[in-house]
Image: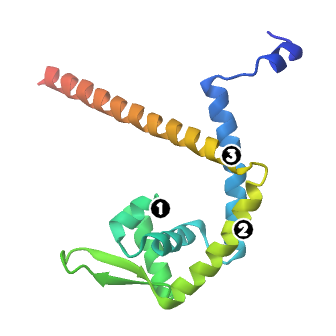
């Protein structure tokens, strides 16, 4: 086992250590976000829905759910809750009558603009240890890491699916 001097000279760059550091950092930044959103009287799901509609415009409920990482049941519940508060409304899609579009109401737009301005300030505070150059580098590295991890998962999914199909075929 290396002593403390040696480990200080050669930092742990393993995938497991990277994951642990990333997880802890993300947890702390998320705690800042959560504290700010809750202080504004919202939950993270509601804030995410409103923020997405503010920046992306009206969206089909299915697309909205995937953008804010909510299941179909959870996005329906969130939209119901926001609709009851008068912050969003559902409208029919003229091209596809089965699809419902969610959009901000005037009240909702006003509420999320104010909340987002405050949230943006809170996130600037949380990231203030990094200058613009550090942030740009971190964003690029995290994007690369996330995209490659996603590709690996897709490959594994295809491989596991093919293996499972092959096993099923041998049983028939």
State the separation of the CA atoms marked 2 and 3: 19 Å
How many C-alpha atoms fall within 10 Å of the one at disc 2: few (<14), some, or many (≥20)? few
State the separation of the CA atoms marked 3 and 1: 28 Å
How many C-alpha atoms fall within 10 Å of the one at disc 3: few (<14), some, or many (≥20)? few
Residue at 57%, 86% in the rendered image: 110
Quadrant position of residue 14:
top right
Question: Which residue lies most toward the front here?
Answer: 133
Q: Is residue 44 left or right of residue 54?
A: right
Residue at 56%, 42% in the rendered image: 140
Disc 1 vs disc 2: which is toward the camera?
2
Residue at the disc numbered 2: 121
Residue at 24%, 79% in the rendered image: 93
Taking 124 as reference, is 27 above or below it? Answer: above
Disc 3 vs disc 1: which is toward the camera?
3
Position of residue 162 measured from the top left corner of the image (x, y, whole percent): 23, 27
Residue sitting nearer the eye, 153 or 56: 56
Residue at the disc numbered 3: 133
How many C-alpha atoms fall within 10 Å of the one at disc 1: few (<14), some, or many (≥20)? some
**Label 2 close to label 3 by CB (< 8 Å):** no
Residue at the disc numbered 1: 68
First in sequence, mark 1 or 2: give its number: 1
Taking 122 as reference, is 155 above or below it? Answer: above
Task: Identify the image quadrant of the N terminus.
Answer: top right
**Label 3 close to label 1 by CB (< 8 Å):** no
Q: Is residue 14 left or right of residue 1?
A: left
Residue sitting nearer the eye, 54 or 163: 54
Q: Is residue 160 left or right of residue 1?
A: left
Position of residue 9 measured from the top left corner of the image (x, y, whole percent): 82, 17
Task: Identify the image quadrant of the C terminus.
Answer: top left
Q: Is residue 71 left or right of residue 40?
A: left
State the separation of the CA atoms marked 1 and 2: 21 Å
């Amino acid at each position: 086992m290396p002593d403390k001097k040696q480990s200080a000279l050669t930092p742990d760059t393993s995938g497991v250590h990277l994951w642990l550091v990333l997880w802890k950092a993300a947890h702390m930044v998320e705690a800042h976000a959560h504290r700010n959103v809750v202080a504004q009287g919202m939950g993270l799901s509601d804030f995410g829905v409103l923020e997405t509609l503010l920046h992306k415009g009206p969206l089909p409920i299915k697309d909205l759910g995937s953008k804010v990482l909510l299941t179909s049941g959870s996005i329906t519940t969130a939209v119901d809750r926001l609709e009851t508060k008068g912050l969003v409304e559902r409208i029919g899609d003229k091209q596809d009558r089965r699809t419902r579009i969610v959009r901000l109401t005037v009240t909702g737009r006003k509420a999320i603009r104010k909340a987002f301005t405050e949230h943006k300030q809170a996130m600037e505070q949380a990231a203030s240890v990094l200058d613009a150059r550090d942030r740009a580098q971190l964003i690029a590295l995290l994007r690369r890491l996330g995209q490659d991890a996603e590709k690996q998962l897709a490959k594994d999914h295809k491989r596991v699916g093919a293996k499972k199909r092959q096993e099923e075929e041998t049983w028939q």
